[in-house]
Each structure stands twice: as C-alpha cells, then as structure tokens.
Image (tube, rainbow, N blue to C red):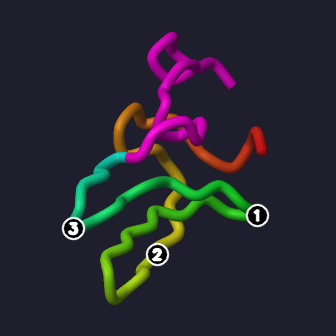
Amino acid sequence: MNETKAQQVCPYCHGHADLISNEDMLIYIKLEEYAYLCAEDDEYISHREIHYCPCCGRKLGDDY
C-alpha cells in the first residue's frame, strides 16, 4: 500500500493522539481486531467500526 507522508505519521490512526479530548468528551480511534471510532463521556461509551482514518484517509486494518 502506498501511503502519503501525512498518512505514515498521522497520530490519530497510529494510536498516539485522541481526536477530541476535553472535560466533557473523549473521541479516539481504537485498533483491535477491527478499527473503531470510539466516543466516551461520563455516562456512555459508543463505538462504530471504521475502515478509513477520519483525519488522513488511510485505509485501516492492513497493518495491525
């Protein structure tokens, strides 16, 4: 797979940074058997399977 430089160093889909992190909500990409976009607040945790990074567009699932 040919990745751009931005895709190779994207901190969001390589698990090094949260998409949103503040006192009310946390949104991040979780890489397990599949890739998930997760959202958490004080009461709920929600997740949805994703196939591409929402920030850099890299296809997820081939390298972990």
Image location of residue 9, percent across then percent down: 53, 19
**Magenta segment range?**
1-18
Which of these two is toward me, 60 or 12? 12
Determine the residue positioned at 32% across, 81% down: 42
Magenta-span inclusion, residue 17: yes
Residue type at the position of mark 1: Glu
Q: Is residue 36 left or right of residue 46?
A: right
Residue type at the position of mark 2: His
Helix, strand or loop at label 1? It is: loop
Q: Is residue 34 left or right of residue 49?
A: right
Gap in angstroms between the C-alphas marked 2 and 1: 14 Å
Q: Nearer the viewer, mark 3 or mark 2?
A: 3
**Residue assigned mark 3:** 24
Which of these two is toward me, 44 or 48? 44
**Residue assigned mark 1:** 33
**Residue assigned mark 2:** 47
